[in-house]
Amino acid sequence: MMKRLQVLFLVALSSSLLLFGCGKEEETPVSQPIVEPIIEAQPQEVVEDPVEEVPEEDLDAPPAEGMVRSRLTNEWVDEEVAKTRPIAVMVPNSKTASQYGLSDASILYECNVEGSMTRLMGVWEDWSNIEKLGNIRSCRDYYLYWAFEWDAIYIHYGGPFYIDELVGREDTQNINCINFSNATYRDTAKNSTDNAFTSTDRIKDAMEHYGYSMEYRDGYADETHYQFATNAEPNTLEQYSDAITATKIDMSPAYPVTNCYFLYNEETGLYDRYQHLSGDSDGPHVDLANNEQLSFKNVLIQSTYFEVRDQKGYLAFQCHDTTRDGWFFTNGKGIHVTWEKTSDYGATRYYDDAGNEIKLNTGKTMVCILEDGDSFNVDDKVIDAD
C-alpha cells in the first residue's frame, strides 16, 4: 500500500513540472513614459503685500521738541524766545539813515512824522544775539501805543516834550538812550547824527538798571494778538469775491519823501520792499547788517485820524478807534478791512467786510499807518484811505 502511494506522488509531481515548463515565459514589463494631462493655465490673482501708508507731513507740527508758535509771526521759535518780551526800537528812514538789523524784525511799523518823512519802529521777538541794531532816533508818542500792544520794551533816543506824559507813566517801560547812555554806542555810519546803535548786552544792562522784567507782564498785552491761518491751509484771499490782484503796492502818494513800494515775489510768496535810496532812482530797501532786502508775508495798511500839533509839523495820530478802515495784502491779493483798538495794551484787530477777524499768514508783517484822507496805488488802481 505504501509503495502505491509513493508512485502516485511521483506521477503528480511530474505532471506539475510539465505544466509549468510548457507555459509562456514571463514577459518583462516595458517602462512607458507618463503623459501628463494638458491643463490650460488659469490667470492667477496677484496678491500684493500690504503697503504701509505713509502719513502726510504735518505742516503744523513743531520741527523740534521745545518749540512753540510765535505770537508775533506764528513761526516756530524756542520756548525761551517766546517767553521773552520783545523790544521796539525807533529807527529813522531818511536817505542818510544807517539801518542795521531791520531784516530780523518780526513786525515793522511805518508812519509819517514831521515834514512828510516817515519813521520806522521795528518789533524784535528774538533779540538774543544782536551786535549792532539801529541807528536809533527819537520817540513819537503814537508809536508807544503800538509798542504797548506787544508789551515791548520801547527803545528811543529822546523826543519832543509831547511824549513826556506818556513816557512818564509808571506802566511805560522804555529805555531813553539819552538818560541811560550805556544803552547805546557810537559806530561808523553815514553821518554823525545817525550813528547811535545798541546791542543785546547793552539792552540787558539797561533793563537790569531799570528793573524791567525779561518776561511778559501778566495782564498787559493780549496773549493772542494776530489771528493766523495754518500752514496746511494758508489764507489765499480767494474766498473773497471782491479781492483784488496786488502785484505792486505803491505807498508813494502817502509817503512822498521815501516813495516806498512793495512788489510781490511769486517765487518766495513775499512782498519785497523798495524805497528811494539815492539820486532819482529807487532800489531795494536793504539791511546794512547783512545786505538782505526787507520782505514781508503780510502788509497791513491802516487809515488813521491825525492832527498837526504845531508849526514845526509835529503830528498826533488817533491810535484808539473803531471807525476807520484799511487794507490787507498777502499772497498777491488784497481785501478791504476795518480796524479797532480799544485800549492802550489791547491789540489792533482787523476785520473783513463781513465782520470776521482776518487771518494773517505765517511770517513777518508790515504795518503802514496812513493819514486819514491819503491814498495809495495798487497796480493801476488808486485806493483812497477813508
Image: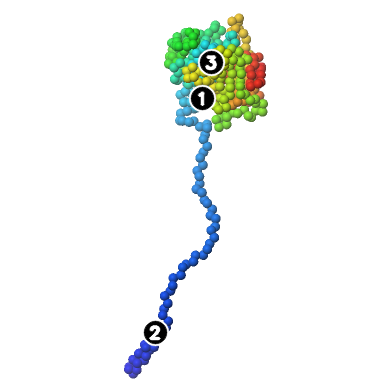
Q: Nearer the viewer, residue 180 or 287?
A: 287
Residue at figure coordinates x 62%, y 10% from the top left? 307
Query: In the rendering, at what x and y percent does residue 229 appear?
Result: 57, 28
Q: Residue furthest left?
A: 3
Q: Is residue 198 visible?
A: yes
Residue at figure coordinates x 51%, y 12% from the top left? 97
Disc 2, SS: helix
CA gap between label 1 and label 2 equals: 115 Å
Q: Residues within 10 Å of mark 2 (few under 14, many from 20)?
A: few
362 to the left or right of 12: right
CA gap between label 3 and label 1 equals: 19 Å
Q: Which mark is residue 70?
A: 1
CA gap between label 3 and label 2 equals: 131 Å
Query: In the rendering, at what x and y percent does residue 17 appear?
Result: 38, 86
Residue at figure coordinates x 34%, y 94% from the top left? 4
Q: Amino acid at mark 1?
A: Ser
Q: Is residue 207 visible?
A: no
Disc 3, SS: strand
36 to the left or right of 317: left
Q: Is residue 45 above or below residue 377?
A: below
Q: Which mark is residue 21?
A: 2
First in sequence: mark 3 vs mark 2: 2
Q: Amino acid at mark 2?
A: Gly
Q: Residues within 10 Å of mark 3 (few under 14, many from 20)?
A: many
Say which of marks 3 and 2 sits in front. 2
Q: Residue furthest top?
A: 311
First in sequence: mark 3 vs mark 1: 1
Residue corresponding to mark 3: 121
Q: Amino acid at mark 3?
A: Met
